[in-house]
Amino acid sequence: MKQYGNYYEEAFLLHRVFKYLFLIPLIGIIVLVAYSGASQVFVPKNIPLFIVAVIFSLLPFVMGRMTIEVKDAQLMITYGYLGWIKRNISLSDIVSTEVVSYNPLRQFGGWGIRYGKFREEKVACFSLSGNKGLLITITSTVKACGRQVNKFIVGCKEPEKLQSIVGK
């Protein structure tokens, strides 16, 4: 059995001050509840706006952090502080890897779990920051944006190190 090294990396959706911008809708919700009165049942008058505020205040917990980990012959990609979105790929399923530079906005429409065109092929992209990553081809498939794909990019700060640990 081949021994793989360990690898761990974290990426964040927004750095430093910008990540706190998501607190603005949460503060708005708290203010709305406080001004509705303690004796009344809180029913916002503008329900669609209230729903959008709740979604934006929860977004950092769902998608604000991405971890990439190689451990126990598995490549594990996890999104969010709560870890609700996970992708596990067996390292034995990996056929090939290549260090690549990509344009997340132009080729995939932004960061996150995306699907788009890279080198005239449809591939998935798992990223939260930067424009460097590891293009991985696997024998099985992984789900991204409602599609099963066997080729995807993992956006990371040190793709060369990840490639050397994955070993293809």
Image: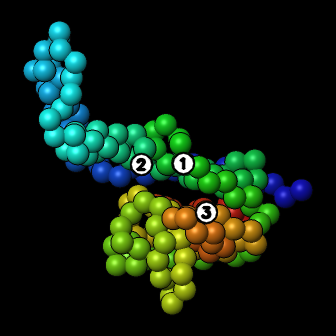
* Label located before the other in sequence (2 or 1): 2
Kindly identify the residue that appears in the image at 13 percent across and 26 percent down. 31
Give the residue at the far bottom of this rendering.
Answer: 120
Structural crowding at the residue carrying mark 3, measured as other residues with C-alpha within 10 Å and reported as few (<14), some (14–19) or many (≥20): few
Residue 53 showing in the rendered view: no
Reply above or below: 114 against 89. below
Kindly identify the residue that appears in the image at 69 percent across and 58 percent down. 89
Amino acid type of the residue tagged 2 in the rendering: Met
| Total residue callouts | 3
Q: Mark 2 — residue?
A: 63
Kindly identify the residue that appears in the image at 48 percent across and 72 percent down. 115
Choose top left, top right, bottom left or bottom right for residue 32.
top left
Choose top left, top right, bottom left or bottom right for residue 143.
bottom right
Left or right: 45 in relation to 142: left
Amino acid type of the residue tagged 1 in the rendering: Ile
In the picture, the disc for residue 143 is 3
Left or right: 61 in relation to 134: left
Residue at disc 2, secondary structure? helix
Cα distance between the residues tagged 2 and 1: 8 Å
Where in the figure is residue 50, as x and y percent of width and height? Answer: 22, 39
Residue at disc 1, secondary structure? strand
* Label located before the other in sequence (1 or 3): 1
Amino acid type of the residue tagged 3 in the rendering: Lys
* Label located before the other in sequence (3 or 2): 2
In the picture, the disc for residue 85 is 1
**For the residues bearing labels 2 and 1, Cβ distance under 8 angstroms:** yes
Structural crowding at the residue carrying mark 1, measured as other residues with C-alpha within 10 Å and reported as few (<14), some (14–19) or many (≥20): some
Where in the figure is residue 144, as x and y percent of width and height? Answer: 55, 64
